[in-house]
Image: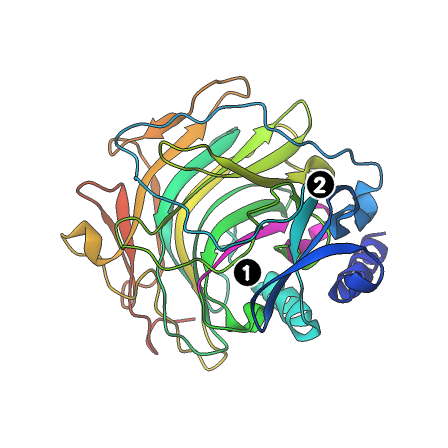
Amino acid sequence: MDFIIKLVSCIISFCLVQFGDSIKVSKSIKLSENIIYDCVDIYKQPSLNHPLLQNHQIQMKPSFSIHKSKEQAKSKIYKNIINCPNGTVPILRNAKQYVAKSQYFAKKHFNPFTVESHGTHFAGVRLHHGPYYGILSWISVHDLNISGDQAPYAHIYVGRRFNNKDNVIQVGWMVNPSIFGDGQTWSYGFWKGANGESCYNTVCPGFIQVSKTNPLSEPIRQAPAEERNIALTIQKVFFFKILHLTYVNYKKPDILLGYWPGELFDLIDNGVDIMGVGGAVESSPSGRSPPMGNGHLPTQDDMESARVYTILYLDQPTAKTMKIVDKSYKLEKLLDSEKCYGLNRGKKMLFTFGGPGGNSCGI
């Protein structure tokens, strides 16, 4: 049965490359020669072709509010000009070669439960002993020069493991020429669910896009260093059994991007037992590791390396506001290669991370 579901998903993923022939596109938005979004009917978007979502009813609004404080990062969303007509959502048009490569990277993607993954290095923190029902964090965004077979990223994640099976959702930013076809910094989403199935963005069915202006994955535009942050929350909505993904704006309305339906997962009906924030990299097959964060090791100056401003979390499914993880909170530190990367408690930030990478980082 597992093999059949995976086979069906692969077939659907291949079909998504040419979905314009079978799904009506009301408008196409071209950001560059190779970055095109097609506006498709929200109720006929490709993700609904997933075999587990045949009877899924789209949920348009979350049922929660996000607490904001003056101490949190004053980040802005520097978005691209994407505005699909009402009733449609933007879906990134995927080239055939990037579909195959994204499936390859999905198999080796950083797994918070098996941090000894070959070729992966990481620097961050995590919380154990849930259940947890939501996480929110602000992470600085950076551009990096890497080779085409490397991938650095920074993210928040939630998940649960039981009997060596994993359910995980990760969101943040990434530089990955193999998946996106360029060296830009992109926002991204990744999930691993029932039967071991996993996927990036909307390359294969799964994530339900709701926003008509903000796709799950897009290039992140330039901005002043102190403002170029990505603020995201993943929150479990129990009544609908879905996991909402939201862009958080300081002093402005938040933007609900969409969600992962509960049907995709078999372990997180009652919350997750692990959450985390930080950076990770995928090394070249040759063993050379790329830079992480902004490429600089943490110092006493918070602004010299990549930063996590704060972490908020929900520990009750009916809680109305998130709790702030302060500096007195006991977080598990994850750092596997001190030769190449670092992780420090910040002065004004919760922590800073990153480093130059290189040939001596280990495997």
User: Looking at the rendering, which quadrant does residue 310 occupy?
Assistant: top left
The answer to which of 236 and 30 lies nearer the viewer is 30
Task: Give the CA separation, mark 1 to mark 2.
Answer: 34 Å
Residue labelled with disc 2: 87
Q: Tell me if residue 191 is in the magenta stretch.
A: yes
Q: Earlier in the sequence, mark 1 or mark 2?
A: 2
Q: Amino acid at mark 2?
A: Gly
The residue under the point 56% across, 51% down is 189
Residue labelled with disc 1: 109
Q: Is residue 166 left or right of residue 233?
A: right
Whether residue 269 is situated above or below residue 219 in the rendered picture: above
The residue under the point 40% across, 25% down is 67
Residue 107 placement (x, y as % from top left): 62, 63
Q: Is residue 166 left or right of residue 126?
A: right
Residue 19 placement (x, y as % from top left): 78, 61
Q: Tell me if residue 202 is in the magenta stretch.
A: no
Q: Which mark is residue 298?
A: none
Q: Amino acid at mark 1?
A: His
The residue under the point 64% across, 52% down is 90
Magenta-highlighted stretch: main secondary structure?
A: strand
Residue 126 placement (x, y as % from top left): 40, 42
Label 2 CA crowd tier, 10 Å (few <14, some 14–19, many 20+): few
Q: Is residue 249 left or right of residue 343?
A: right
Q: Outermost residue toward the bottom?
A: 286
Q: Which residues are magenta?
A: 185-199
Q: Is residue 250 left or right of residue 314?
A: left
Q: Quadrant of the C terminus?
A: bottom left
The residue under the point 69% across, 36% down is 262
Whether residue 197 is situated above or below residue 73 in the rendered picture: below
Q: Is residue 271 visible?
A: no
Residue 66 placement (x, y as % from top left): 45, 27
